[in-house]
Image (cartoon, rainbow, N blue to C red):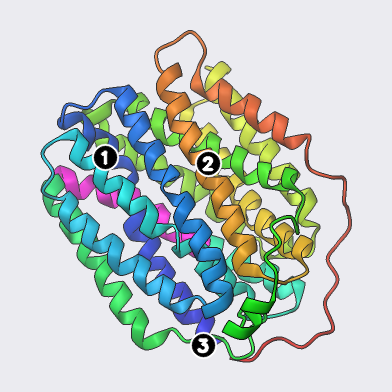
Amino acid sequence: MKMAFWLYFFLFLAFFDLHAQYPILTPFALTLGATPAFIGWMMGIYALTHLPGNLLAGQGVDRHGSRRYMIFSLISAGIILLLQAHVTEPWQLLALRSVSGFVLAFLAPACLAMLASLSSDPIRQGKFMAGHGVVHTLASVVSPAAGAFLVAQTSYSFTFQSLGWLLIATGILAIFTIREPQGAASKLTLQEAAKTPVKLNIIPLRFYILPLAVSCSQGILYFELPFQAGGASGIVNTGVYFSIISLGALVTLSMLFLSHYSPYIRAAMGILGIALSFFAMAALDFVPLQVSLFMLGMAKGVTFPAIASMFIDLSGGKRLGTVFSLQSISMSIGSFIGPIAGGMLHGKITSPYFAAFLILMVALLLIPPRTGKLKSNPVPPVTT
């Protein structure tokens, strides 16, 4: 589909920009004089400010479609990065990251809802979710190392400005290329939206604990890994480590045949794989860190498309903007808790990675034992 191509193209540019910041934010904060505890709160507040954006995005996407929210998110985040290039105090970075968390909260629900609306067939929807993961991972394979290398060769200021202009250019190009799918099931007219009651309990609450737990463990990883790589002096190593995770995810995301199998089984196997990878990093010193990170990435490549497909199945393909908004809210809560927990456990007897392992194993118990392959839906796909 032409629309899917353009959507993937702009998602690649956006994800490249965002993931390039992961290995450099912690070292940058350290150069400003921030403490590890402050950095944990900075990363957590960024996730917390996702919540109001997610709430607005869910109803907004269902009523007005995804396009305007994608454009707003990309351009606004780019402007914030331009301002971030000139901060000199930790509190200034905290303030800008808080605003950035809000504006970027619109991006994921809008993108996922538009991708899901391109077809009403569950297998094709699963492939679209996997394609979203592939694009996301392709961008994140090279972007962390690229961001770290750019800082090492130039400066933090130049790097943030370059990434900011890239986001702004991506948003402007999206204005002329992204169009709403005609007849998308996830988009409601204003009159329909006014008459349709908002039901936040269409999916049992326990299912939202799954993305919360995964994102919480991921927040712990994003906090702890830069310190393990050497802090500001090991910024290139940090970038390489994040790229190794993405390479592992790319392996399993490329296995498109997995979308034919039950998303419940895929989610269970993926979460188990992530948990075991964290256990290896926490307790198995004989396992090289690079191997554990690669296996963690492979498990992530199974988990995130499976969770997205699981929510489409549970919702029956209705109110996808709200569904993915609630998923993003749960992930924001997990991303808020994760780095703060990592900051509290950093340097203590208990490894933050072991805490991530325990959280994931508890979440694993909440997945229902649904088995089998997905069956194709006879309803024809939505045309674009």
Residue 142 visible in the shown view? no
Cα distance in 3D space between marks 1 and 2: 17 Å
Report the span colored magenta.
134-153
- As helix, strand or loop, the secondary structure at mark 1 comes to helix
Kind of residue at badge 3 = Lys
Give the residue number, with chain letter if any, for mark 1. 94
Q: Is residue 345 left or right of residue 238?
A: right
Res 302 seen here:
yes
- Asked if the residue at tag 1 contacts the one at tag 3, i.e. Cβ–Cβ closer than 8 Å, the answer is no
The mark found on residue 333 in the picture is 2
From the image, state whether disc 2 or disc 3 is nearer to you.
Answer: 2
Q: Residues within 10 Å of mark 1 (few under 14, many from 20)?
A: many
Vertical order, 180 against 131 (above or below): below
Q: Which residue bears the numbered disc 3?
A: 2
In terms of secondary structure, where does tag 2 sit?
A: helix
Quarter holding residue 275 = top right
Does residue 86 sit above or below 278 in this rendering?
A: below
Instruction: Inspect the image, locate mark 2, and give the three-letter code of the amino acid beneath it.
Output: Ile
- Would you call the spot at circle 3 few (<14 residues within 10 Å), some (14-19), or many (20 or more)? few
In this rendering, the answer to whether 76 lies above or below 246 is below
- Identify which residue is drawn at 42% across, 71% down: 70
* Mark-to-mark CA distance, 3 and 1: 39 Å
Is residue 23 part of the magenta span, yes or no?
A: no
Residue 45 location in percent, x, y? 38, 39
Rendered residue at 74%/36% (across/down)? 364
Identify the main secondary structure in magenta. helix
